[in-house]
């Protein structure tokens, strides 16, 4: 039984200028846990290491409120 027509994203994107953050944002996006738009926004909001967790939690909370449970698990 096919539940939906999900297609894994393809490619590597420039979400953040620092590779350590960019790699992780691409990882969440490429396995389908995050929307492209969310990764772009988070990439812009992360200025230092301490920003990572609050930004990811904010994205997860927003996804939960929108009913996008798969997106809230990143």
Image: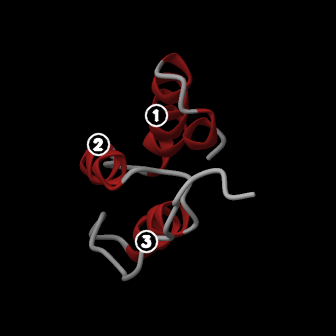
Q: Nearer the viewer, residue 15 or 18?
A: 15
- Within 10 Å of disc 2 (Cα), the crowding (few <14, some 14-19, many 20+) is few
Q: Residue placed at 61% from the left, 47% from the top?
A: 74
Protein image colouring = secondary structure
**Image: 68 above or below 2:** above
Q: Mark 2 or mark 3: name the one nearer the start of the chain.
A: 3
Mark 2 residue element:
helix
Please state if 69 lies on the left or on the right of 62 as rendered: right
| Extreme-bottom residue of the structure | 11
**Distance of label 1 from label 3 (alpha carbons):** 19 Å
65 shown above or below 51:
above
Mark 3 or mark 1, which is nearer the start of the sequence? 3
Residue at 45 percent across and 62 percent down: it is 25
In the image, which disc is placed on residue 45? 2
Identified at 30% across, 64% down, the residue is: 15
x and y percentages locating residue 21 in the rendered image: 44, 64
Whole-percent x, y for residue 67 in the image? 54, 23
Whether residue 54 sits left or right of residue 16 in the image: it is right
Q: Circle 1 sits on which residue?
A: 59
Mark 1–mark 2 distance (CA, rounded to whole Å): 11 Å
State the residue lying farthest toward the right. 1
Q: Which residue is mark 3?
A: 9
> Which of the image's four quarters has the N terminus?
bottom right
């Amino acid at each position: 039984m096919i539940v939906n027509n999900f297609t894994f994203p393809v490619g590597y994107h420039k979400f953040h200028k620092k590779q350590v953050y960019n790699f992780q944002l691409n990882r969440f996006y490429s396995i389908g846990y995050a929307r492209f738009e969310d990764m772009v926004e988070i990439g812009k909001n992360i200025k230092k290491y301490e920003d990572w967790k609050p930004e990811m939690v904010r994205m997860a909370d927003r996804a939960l409120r929108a009913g996008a449970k798969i997106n809230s698990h990143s």
